[in-house]
């Protein structure tokens, strides 16, 4: 079995183009396009292309709260805190890859995911650029893997072993209420590892909600993948603008929910923007919803937050769950309403036994990056 360095990212690959050549049609319809943010018009186009904002009923959900007080750990390739849409939002955590930051591409995928979770826009009234699902949350950047295409991924740099497991523990120990993982294959294989499984249980016991992408080879081998396959992790698939399951989205009986994952505009490194397909952005969006629920209902346990997200879905499938659709399409406003109906505990809970799992399945899940049709950085 092919070994992977640290973790495998599951977002799409992109093509760099000059900002002047990007049109509204590019931003709202093209797949895999990166645009430099040099002109004011690019920021406006980026905001206009965020179709998921209305699909999630975010303007209504934001009347309840915007994620204030919640720290979301983004376990990824690093987050570029210099991006104008993330100004003031990023807490710099450790680099656990063992690779020097200046020796290769850095922070593109992680910055994109952070933008979907806690982007704040920029300019007058923050009306330009991308806005995340929880724009008042903070992001803890923990680098656990390298970018797709980085030749160092084929090596195992010193310090890279069990980076994902160590990143999960670091996030849980440093106050993360939500841990977002748009990646897979963290142990170097497709089978997971005891260290990661234990780290997941540890984080759940510390009160963190864990979210991971379900994978982008649903139209091929449709593999089980980790960390989404660990019990207690919210596994997220992707839907398109018509809320149909994306062809690439993995189908598994442990899938929790699906979320927007095609033609998604978000931040990129160096102040630019990217349009992408994949279950990576879908997972980041659900991590943002989890942050909203945690902010407005701080007494809920990780299991109750997950229950609220699963109960607060649109287009619930017949029988309540399918391997392709999970419990339905995640929706921010409906998740908050579902959380209202859950009995809050007296304080944060520490689970004493096996953590409840999603749906009727056997308790596993899959990852997410799409190079069309590749499933890897």
Image (cartoon, helix red, strand yellow):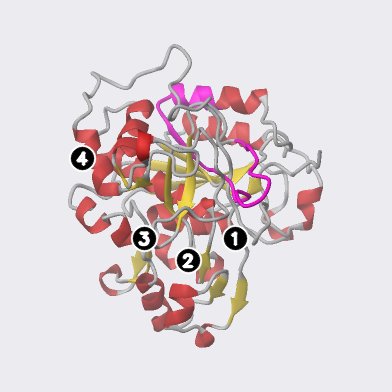
For the point 53% across and 77% down, the residue is: 36
Q: Tell me the distance, in whole angstroms, between the alpha carbons under discs 2 and 3.
A: 9 Å
Residue identified by numbered label 1: 12
Q: Residues within 10 Å of mark 4 (few under 14, many from 20)?
A: some
Specify the segment rendered in magenta: 200-226
Q: Tell me the distance, in whole angstroms, between the alpha carbons under discs 1 and 3.
A: 17 Å
The answer to which image quadrant residue 110 occupies is: bottom right
Q: Which numbered circle lies on residue 263?
A: 2
Quick one: SS at disc 4?
helix
Question: Is 75 located above or below residue 147 in the figure?
Answer: above
The N terminus: image quadrant:
top right
Which of the two labelled residues, at mark 4 and mark 3, occupies the earlier sequence position? Answer: 3
User: Which of 300/135 is in front?
Assistant: 300
User: Which of 369/112 is in front?
Assistant: 369
Quick one: SS at disc 1?
loop
Question: Is 52 located above or below residue 339 in the figure?
Answer: below
User: Which of 166/227 is in front?
Assistant: 227
Q: Are marks 1 and 3 in contact (CB under 8 Å)?
A: no
For the point 24% across and 41% down, the residue is: 336
Q: Tell me the distance, in whole angstroms, between the alpha carbons under discs 2 and 4.
A: 28 Å
């Amino acid at each position: 079995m092919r070994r992977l360095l640290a973790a495998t990212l599951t977002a799409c690959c992109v093509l760099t183009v000059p900002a002047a050549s990007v049109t509204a049609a590019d931003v709202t319809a093209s797949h895999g396009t990166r645009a430099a943010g040099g002109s004011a018009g690019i920021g406006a186009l980026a905001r206009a292309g965020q179709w998921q904002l209305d699909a999630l009923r975010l303007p209504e959900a934001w009347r309840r709260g915007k994620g204030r007080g919640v720290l979301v750990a983004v376990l990824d390739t690093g987050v570029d805190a210099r991006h104008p849409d993330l100004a003031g939002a990023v807490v710099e955590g450790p680099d656990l890859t063992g690779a020097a930051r200046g020796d290769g591409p850095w922070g593109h995928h992680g910055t994109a995911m952070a933008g979907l979770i806690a982007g704040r826009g920029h300019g007058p009234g923050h009306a330009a650029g991308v806005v995340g699902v929880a724009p008042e949350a903070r992001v803890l950047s923990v680098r656990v893997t390298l970018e797709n295409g980085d030749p160092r991924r084929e090596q195992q740099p010193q310090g890279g072993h069990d980076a994902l497991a160590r990143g999960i523990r670091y996030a849980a120990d440093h106050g993360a209420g939500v841990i977002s993982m748009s990646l897979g294959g963290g142990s170097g294989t497709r089978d997971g590892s005891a260290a990661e499984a234990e780290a997941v249980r540890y984080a759940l016991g510390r009160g963190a909600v864990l979210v991971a992408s379900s994978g982008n080879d649903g139209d091929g081998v449709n593999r089980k993948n980790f960390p989404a396959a660990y019990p207690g992790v919210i596994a997220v698939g992707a839907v398109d603008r018509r809320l149909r399951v994306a062809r690439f989205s993995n189908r598994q009986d442990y899938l929790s929910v699906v979320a927007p994952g095609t033609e998604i505009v978000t931040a990129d490194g160096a102040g630019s923007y990217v349009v992408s397909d994949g279950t990576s952005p879908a997972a980041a969006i659900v991590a943002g919803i989890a942050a909203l629920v945690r902010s407005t209902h701080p007494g809920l346990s990780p299991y109750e937050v997950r229950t609220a997200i699963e109960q607060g879905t649109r287009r619930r499938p017949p029988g309540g769950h399918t391997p392709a659709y999970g419990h339905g399409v995640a929706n921010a406003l409906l998740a908050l309403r579902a959380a209202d109906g859950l009995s809050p505990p007296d304080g944060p809970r520490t689970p004493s036994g096996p953590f409840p799992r999603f749906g009727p399945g056997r308790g596993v899940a899959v990852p997410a990056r799409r190079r069309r049709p590749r499933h890897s950085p």
